[in-house]
Image (cartoon, rainbow, N blue to C red):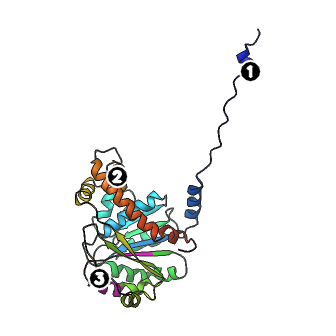
């Protein structure tokens, strides 16, 4: 049987371009694989300054950058961070040897690269002392781990007493003072002599500013019990579609973008990956 012209000369298929990974993602993956295990300690001895808010923002930022991250909430027996990031958070007692082992003995074996520790109020200086006594700070000095401290300040000059107590433990850490304006808090300003007095012996010291967020927006995220990023994506704590207010999601989106810009400004990813110039 004679073949029809259409059979003899089938139309040529358009050549498909090869699938190429995003080079930025590829670089990110390579840098993540080479990262040393890192501990991010978020704390303050004064209560009500927004430590858990900062820990939640760090978790969202790192997850958004595809950095394998886990968290430990030391507000036993029922942690606030656990409520918002339940799938990645374990509640621990930072003073208990068994829980210290859960955190530190797994740093080199865990698939995750970054461990966030949300230190409950009143345990910040004690947590640093425990890390010193365990030998973690010495291991940081030897280059085995990356250690970053986010010290969330209170609004009064009394925070200087906290800094005086905690700064000696930060000689080999990257130390950041966090001014959390989410509740419209005002803070004291540094003079160069005071700054030098506290931080002349630390590897790096800087400031992170968390801008104010609409009170209603913050309250709705709290009611939803979802990560900030999930609220913005209009999803609930279980990841399912939700019906959050478009307006309030917009406020949170803009606020979270400003916070992420702050983490970019201090070079957080560079500190974690050991990039030059961090």
| Left or right: residue 227 compared with residue 142 | left
Whether the magenta-drawn stretch holds residue 197 is answered as: no
Q: Which residue is mark 3?
A: 159
Q: Earlier in the sequence, mark 3 or mark 1?
A: 1
Residue occupying the far right of the picture: 2
Q: Which mark is residue 9?
A: 1
Query: Percent x, y for residue 236?
Result: 31, 49
> SS for tag 3?
helix
Query: Percent x, y for residue 15?
Result: 67, 35
Q: Residue at x 77, y 10 (%)?
A: 2
Q: Which residue is mark 2?
A: 232
| Left or right: residue 117 compared with residue 154 | right
Q: Which residues are magenta?
A: 148-165
CB-based contact (under 8 Å), mark 2 and mark 1:
no
In the depicted structure, whether residue 135 falls above or below residue 101 = below
In the depicted structure, whether residue 173 falls above or below residue 239 = below
**Closest to the observer: 149 or 248?**
248
**Closest to the observer: 60 or 112?**
60
CB-based contact (under 8 Å), mark 3 and mark 2:
no
Q: Residue at x 35, y 57 (%)?
A: 254
Query: Percent x, y for residue 82?
Result: 32, 61
Residue occupying the far top of the picture: 1
């Amino acid at each position: 049987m004679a073949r029809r012209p259409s059979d003899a000369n089938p139309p040529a298929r358009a050549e498909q371009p090869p699938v190429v990974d995003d080079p930025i993602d590829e670089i990110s993956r390579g840098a993540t694989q080479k990262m040393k295990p890192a501990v991010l300690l978020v704390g303050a001895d004064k209560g009500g300054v927004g430590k858990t808010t900062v820990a939640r923002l760090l978790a969202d930022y790192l997850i958004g950058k595809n950095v394998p991250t886990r968290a430990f909430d030391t507000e036993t027996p029922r942690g606030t961070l656990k409520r918002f990031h339940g799938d990645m958070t374990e509640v621990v007692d930072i003073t208990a040897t068994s829980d210290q082992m859960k955190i530190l003995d797994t740093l080199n074996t865990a698939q995750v690269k970054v461990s966030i520790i949300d230190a409950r109020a009143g345990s910040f200086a004690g947590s640093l002392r425990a890390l010193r006594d365990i030998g973690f700070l010495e291991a940081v000095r030897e280059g085995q781990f990356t250690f970053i401290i986010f010290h969330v300040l209170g609004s009064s000059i009394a925070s200087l007493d906290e800094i005086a107590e905690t700064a000696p433990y930060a000689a080999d850490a990257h130390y950041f003072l966090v001014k959390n304006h989410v509740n419209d808090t005002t803070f004291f300003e540094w003079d160069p002599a005071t700054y030098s007095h506290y931080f002349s012996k630390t590897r790096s010291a800087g400031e992170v500013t968390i801008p104010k967020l609409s009170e209603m927006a913050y309250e709705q995220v709290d009611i939803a019990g979802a990560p900030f990023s999930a609220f913005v994506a209009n999803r609930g704590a279980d990841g399912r579609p939700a019906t959050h207010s478009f307006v309030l999601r917009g406020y949170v989106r803009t606020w979270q973008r400003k916070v992420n810009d702050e983490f970019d400004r201090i070079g957080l990813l560079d500190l974690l990956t050991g990039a030059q110039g961090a």
